[in-house]
Image: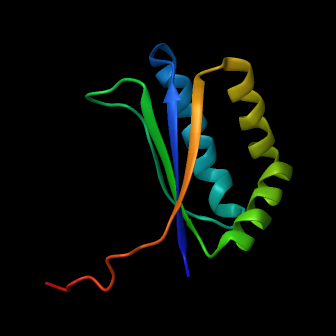
Amino acid sequence: MTITVFIRYEIDPAKKAEFETYARNWGQAIPRNGADLIGYYAPHEGSSTVAYGVYNIENLAAYEQYRERLKHDPLGQKNYIFAHKEKFILREDRLFLKLASAPHAKE
C-alpha cells in the first residue's frame, strides 16, 4: 500500500526565497533517494507562512530506508545545513496518509 507524506512547514515570510531554494534542492535529492516526489509548494496568495512538501512512498519500511539514504546524499546534507543555518523553517509537521477515494471515475 502506497502512503503519501505531507510535510507542512511554517516558514519565515521574509525568507520565502530561501524556502524556494530548499524546495528545488529536494526536487533533485528526493527522487534519486527512492520517493516519488509530487512537489514542494511555497506561499503565493493567502497565508505567507504555510508551505508543503508532498511525496509518495511504498510503505513505512521503505520510508525509513529512504530517510537513511537521504541523510547520506550530498545535496540532502547540504540542504539540511542550509535550512539550519538560514532558519527559514519555523515549524515542520509530517502526516502519513493513504488514498481512501480510489478507484476514481474515469469520466
The quadrant in which residue 69 appears is bottom right
Q: Position of residue 16 (x, y in %)?
A: 47, 23
Side of 57 where 9 appears, left or right: left
Which residue is outermost to the top? 14
The quadrant in which residue 31 appears is bottom right
Q: Position of residue 22 (x, y in %)?
A: 60, 35
43 and 64: which one is in front? 64
Give the colour scheme of this rendering: rainbow
The residue under the point 57% across, 49% down is 94
Side of 40 where 69 appears, left or right: right
The residue under the point 42% across, 35% down is 42
Check the picture and name the quadrant holding the N terminus.
bottom right
106 and 95: which one is in front? 95
Which residue is outermost to the left? 107
Examine the rendered structure and indicate whether residue 66 appears above or below residue 7.
below
The residue under the point 86% across, 51% down is 72
Q: Position of residue 57 (x, y in %)?
A: 60, 69
Check the picture and name the quadrant holding the C terminus.
bottom left
94 and 58: which one is in front? 94
Q: Position of residue 48 (x, y in %)?
A: 37, 23
Examine the rendered structure and indicate whether residue 96 appears above or below residue 18.
below
The quadrant in which residue 102 appears is bottom left
Q: How many marks?
A: 0
